[in-house]
Image (tube, rainbow, N blue to C red):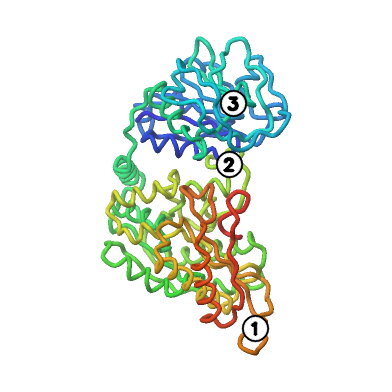
Amino acid sequence: MDSILILDFGSQYTQLIARRVRELNTFAEIKPWNGAWRELLETPPEEDPQGRTWKGVILSGSPFSVRDEGAPSPDLDGIRGKWPVLGVCFGAQWLAQKAGGSVEPSNSREYGRAHLTHIDPQDPLFGGMTEGKAVWMSHGDTIQSAGDQTKITCSTADVKYAGFAFQGEPTWGIQFHPEVYHSEEGLTLLRNFVHGICACSADWTPAHFVDTTVEDLKQKLGQDRVVLGLSGGVDSSVAAMLLHRAIGDQLYCIFVDNGLLRKHEFEEVLEGYEGMGLNVKGVRSADRFYKALSGVSDPEGKRKAIGATFIDVFDEESGLLDGVKWLGQGTIYPDVIESVSATGGPSATIKSHHNVGGLPDFMKLEVVEPLRMLFKDEVRRVGREMGLDAHLLGRHPFPGPGLGIRILGEVTEEKVQLLQNADRIWVDKLREHGHYDRVWQAGTILLPVQSVGVMGDERTYEQAVALRAVSSTDGMTADWVDFPHAFLAEVSNAIINKVRGINRVVYDISSKPPATIEWE
């Protein structure tokens, strides 16, 4: 399997590069720049567990400046010239500096859209691209020169060295981000590199992923039994079906009512799993979660309390089953990159996820995560390949901690019921007006404030909720959805009139970044 190696220098968006390469049906894997990636490159395909043939290397962006003490500095001796190399942003600046060029602070920080005013039509990296198209810049330093061994391949009005190539070796640097959708021909550039320069085949498809993953799971698990926590969402459901195809009745699924689900979700989810051939057991444990959350207001504290309680429940439930050795989880790439670097690299932690980071020593189960390398849209494509119900695959992502992180401050049963009722109206209205399928994720947030209101001739002093709806492709970036005001007014009126205890509704118009999709 032809593959591209991406060296991670700590950018939160390194995963977007991998995602774009995978859109080209070529496998991409991320490794920290300071890890054992060289061994991976030098492993022959016949000795690689996945049969990978490495055809090229991409150097990611970074929060560091190349001028910083302790900035990433990989050893590429023996790599350059043997494999094609593409440096992006920091990666390009690092290549320029190593070549004897100059990287200096720019007169003004270069963020946002720029336009290519010059493209070298003879350079294979820019085949089929046109001058004047937008590219996305995101750097405070800029390349003043890239050394005598290079030539300029593209420029913008403000950035002379927007792109350069080394003469005599297949190595390129670009200061813009082709992985970001705002770069209008970014995918064309990546296709030129991956399929043209690196000569990668386009054979990494959902069908290929299903076949190889199922075979790997068969080899890994053998006759062992696996217990998996279902959530009713896309990730855990697809993970369950992959495991089911591999080991059949050796898989035991548990769906926990943690008291933090959407209204009627426990019953509806169990009903939805009927006919899928899975062994599913429903466990009501709301009281245990409420007890664990009592007095906890800190977001990370709540996530950890919920995660620890999940582990306790699974430990007890798995103890009722003979011979269970593995805990299956629907962990996906965005979960991992926001908790820790996807592969142990230098990326910053945004927030922890209850299904990331392994298990405590007392729990004698090993973890199996068949979706760990996939983005949400890739998970959906894999689900479609396996014939999962379209209604299930179209469900919005729902956080593992559930409504526990949509209630700001301490969680109580009364607050949960209040939020469930408001959230049900919000989601039902999205479906009723045909908005649900164009929204990536929607939810209702119970705010830790009360506000004065008036109903009839009476003064009220009740809770406020915030409505949240975003559009996204991968969860790494997201924009708020611009609904008609009349629709938002209808939702607000329905919530205030039908949910006793709420007298104010606001709509969140924050994008990610700088905000996250969830409030906690």
Residue 454, numbered label: 1
Residue 12, numbered label: 2
The earlier-in-sequence mark between 1 and 2 is 2
The earlier-in-sequence mark between 2 and 3 is 2
User: Could you say where residue 324 lies in the image, as x and y percent from the top left?
Assistant: 39, 58
Quarter of the picture containing the C terminus is bottom right
Q: Nearer the viewer, residue 508 or 13?
A: 508
Position above or below: 262 against 392:
below
- As helix, strand or loop, the secondary structure at mark 1 comes to strand
Quarter of the view holding residue 45: top left
- Label 2: how many residues lie within 10 Å, few (<14), some (14-19) or many (20+)? many
Type of amino acid at the residue the image marks with label 3 = Thr
Q: Nearer the viewer, residue 82 or 497?
A: 497
The earlier-in-sequence mark between 1 and 3 is 3
- As helix, strand or loop, the secondary structure at mark 2 comes to loop
Type of amino acid at the residue the image marks with label 2 = Gln
Residue shown at 44% from the left, 19% from the top: 124
The answer to whether mark 2 and mark 3 are in CB contact below 8 A is no
Q: CA distance from mark 1 to mark 2?
A: 46 Å
- Label 3: how many residues lie within 10 Å, few (<14), some (14-19) or many (20+)? some
Quarter of the picture containing the N terminus is top left
Type of amino acid at the residue the image marks with label 1 = Val
Residue shown at 71% from the left, 28% from the top: 106
Position above or below: 305 against 77:
below
User: Could you say where residue 405 lies in the image, as x and y percent from the top left?
Assistant: 58, 64
Residue 156, numbered label: 3
Mark nearest the camera among 2 and 3 is: 3
